[in-house]
Amino acid sequence: MVNELAAFLGAATLIAMVPGPSTVVIVQRAARNGRRAGLATVLGNETGVLAWGLAAALGLSALLIASRVAYDTLRIAGAAVLVWFGLRALWQTRRRRTTTPHAETAENAPAENAPAENAAAGTGGEAEPAGAGRCYRHGLVTSFANPKAGVFAVSFLPQFVPHGAPVPLTLAALSVLWALIDLAWYTPIVWLAGGAGRVLRRPRVRRTLERLSGIVLLGFGLRLATDTN
């Protein structure tokens, strides 16, 4: 049992470190709306991770492997969600550029605005409020948008079930552990991205960040849509 657990911890940590759509969305939220919003997005994502793991424990994720129609339906739906997120991010950069031209001069404004900026930085620097519920749903939808997570769960988690252990219960426990490892990985990332928010929310830097995240999400969506494996 100890050997399987150690192997699982190492593998799950490496998997958490691999960047994906969730990473882009979490960093984007933390940089744009602050640490609280970033953490809410992480919690939504981990709820999705836990749901995929529990689905594997109940045997539901196996349907994605057994039924090509079910997998393709979720794949196309997930791709559409990621493409929508990417296009929306790109559209927001265009809209901000045309509606807030004065923001460029605000970057080099006199020190009269410094106290307010410093106060914002001290509280996480949230320049654009976003409800925790909305951020949570954003993370949850992003996690559900990738059906490969379900296929991965049903093929990855069973490898670490010790011989003779109750399979559904063990898979459920591993799913919880998987979500906690993901949470431990993303929390410092949110902290760093939220702390850098004062710089990242400057109009020029923010547009670049939004454009980059939009392109990456769009790429993930198109890749998922065209993946027939």
Image (tube, rainbow, N blue to C red):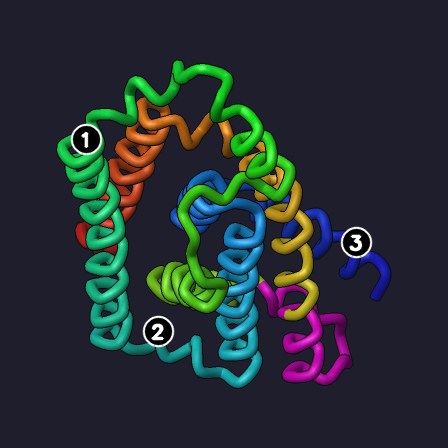
Distance, label 3 to label 2, CA atoms, is 28 Å
N-terminal of the two: label 1 or label 2? 2
Find out whether residue 172 is within the magenta segment. Answer: yes
Q: Which mark is residue 97?
A: 1
Q: Is residue 133 above or below residue 97?
A: below
Q: Is residue 15 above or below residue 177?
A: above
Return the residue nearer the eye: 135 or 185: 135
Corner quadrant of residue 219: top left
Return the residue nearer the eye: 8 or 123: 123
Position of the N terminus, as image quadrant, is: bottom right
Distance, label 1 to label 3, CA atoms, is 50 Å
Q: Is residue 184 left or right of 202 when viewed as pictured?
A: right
SS label for mark 2: helix
Our reading of the magenta stretch's main secondary structure is: helix
N-terminal of the two: label 1 or label 3? 3
At a point 67% along the width and 81% down the height, the residue shown is 167
At a point 53% along the width and 85% down the height, the residue shown is 58
Residue 11 horizontal/vertical position (percent)? 65, 49
Return the residue nearer the eye: 127 or 111: 111
Which span of residues is magenta-colored?
157-175
Pair 1/3: label in front: 1
Report the residue marked by disc 3.
Answer: 6
Report the residue marked by disc 2.
Answer: 64
Q: Is residue 197 above or below residue 138?
A: above
Position of the C terminus, as image quadrant, is: bottom left
Give the residue type that dot 2 points to: Leu
SS label for mark 1: helix
